[in-house]
Each structure stands twice: as C-alpha cells, then as structure tokens.
Amino acid sequence: MKDAILRKARESAEVKEQFFRAEADRIERLVRAMAERFQRGGWLYVMGNGGSATDAQHVAVEFFHPIIEKRKPLPALALATDPALITAIANDRDFAKVFADQLRVLARPGDMALAISTSGQSPNLAQALEAARELDLLTAAFTGKDGGRLADLAEYCFVVPSFSIHRIPRMKAALRYRGRAPAIARSLTVPLTASIPMSPPGKKSGVTTCASVVKASRPPATFRTA
C-alpha cells in the first residue's frame, strides 16, 4: 500500500512538472492578457459541469473574494450557480445552451470566458466558447486527455497531458493556484480605480446575487440567441 501511494505521488508530480515546463510561457501570456482586460473593466465568466462546475465556482471566488492576497476583488462570475436559471434554459431551450445564453446577456467585448472540462467535449462549453468568440471575449480552457472540442475553440487552451480522471482535476487545481488570481493581481499596472458595486443603484442594503451585481454595474444588453 505504501509503495502504491508513493508511486501515485511521483506520477502526479511528474505530470505537473511536465505540464508547467511546457506551458509556463503561455500561462504568463494569458495572465498578462487577463490583467489588461481586468484593468479596462472586464469581467471573467467561468463555467463547467459536475466537478468542473465546483472548480469554476472556486476560480470565481479566488478573484471575487481574495483572502490570501490582500487586494481589491476582481469581477468574476461562475455561470453554473443558479439552478432555476440553468434548469429553465435546459428545459425550454437546450442544456447545450445554458452557458452561451448567459454570456449573450451578461458579457461585453473585452470580457473573458474560462471553460473547465476533464474531457473537453461538453457541448454546452463548446457553444459557450463559440458565443464568447462572437462577442469578442478572451477565451481560455482547462482540459485533459487530448483537449477535445475545446482545444480548437479557446484562444488559450491548457491540456493536462493525462487520460487519468483523477490526475486531471488535481492539475487544474495546481494551474488555478499558480497561474491565476494572485499572478494577475500582481500584473495590474495600477490599482483598480473602483470597487465592485455590491447592490443596485439606489439601494443601500438587501440580498444581492452575483448576477445582479453584473446588471447593476454594466449597461443593458440586447439578448441574442443562437
């Protein structure tokens, strides 16, 4: 048992080292590109299915509510957190459109979309990245195996060199912590000029969702469906 544990640990470490040696330069380019977009007021939209949906929530929290790094929050929203909205779109239209439809309402040119998937084959993530490209968003993806459909759709697609469904999520977690919110915050050339509004204009208190924050802080959009 001990030998098996140590072997798994070595294999995991080898995958991480192989990945970061190959991708360090591209990770830096993505960090700088995202920092520029945050600096101009861009938002990050993150999405995934199943375990990757919880990964997406974790990513959004790292930006929106920075605990370790004492800095101002950066605007990020996970798109799988509203069960009423998700099931309404899935029931009335198609589950493949649950993320793309949200992007078409919420996103603006200059924003960012991050798709997280172990296989890279999820139809709703593929349609979301297609919509993001139409809207002139920066597109990124974390995937495993051979990258699947997302490899051809994301401007920055990081593929974990493994077919292990256990190792891929651990690598995505490592990438999240090493290449994301802290590094992007350090790349900002000047401090953010304004804090994120936490309630709609004219209201001093009350329950506020992340979606209402987006609506309150951005101009209205024309809803477009595919």
Image (tube, grey):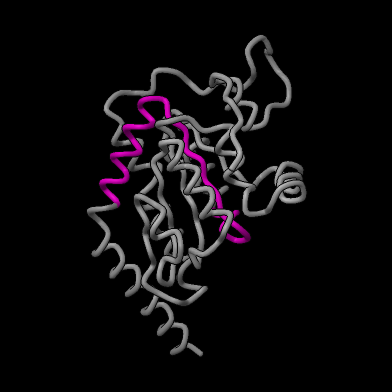
Residue situated in front as seen by the camera: 137 or 5: 137
Q: Is residue 144 above or below residue 3?
A: above
At x 57% / y 24%, what residue is drawn?
A: 221
Q: Is residue 163 above or below residue 21?
A: below
Q: How many circles with numbers are drawn on the protein?
A: 0
Is the stretch drawn in magenta largely helix, strand or loop? helix
Compared across the picture, whether 17 is left or right of 129 comes to left
Q: In which quarter of the image is residue 40?
A: top left
The residue at the far top in this view is: 202
Compared across the picture, whether 48 is left or right of 178 comes to right
Q: Quadrant of residue 22?
A: bottom left
Q: Where is residue 48 in the image (x, y as percent from the top left)?
A: 56, 54
Instruction: Tell me which segment is drawn in magenta.
Output: 27-55
Residue situated in front as seen by the camera: 216 or 72: 216
Q: Where is residue 180 in the image (x, y as percent from the top left)?
A: 39, 46
Q: In which quarter of the image is the C terminus?
A: top right
Q: Is residue 3 above or below residue 125?
A: below
Q: Position of residue 172 (x, y in %)?
A: 44, 60
At x 66% / y 45%, what residue is drawn?
A: 81
Residue situated in front as seen by the camera: 220 or 50: 220
Q: Where is residue 157 in the image (x, y as percent from the top left)?
A: 37, 56
Compared across the picture, whether 189 is left or right of 69 comes to left
At x 64% / y 47%, what residue is drawn?
A: 98
Question: Magenta stretch: residue 16 in it?
Answer: no
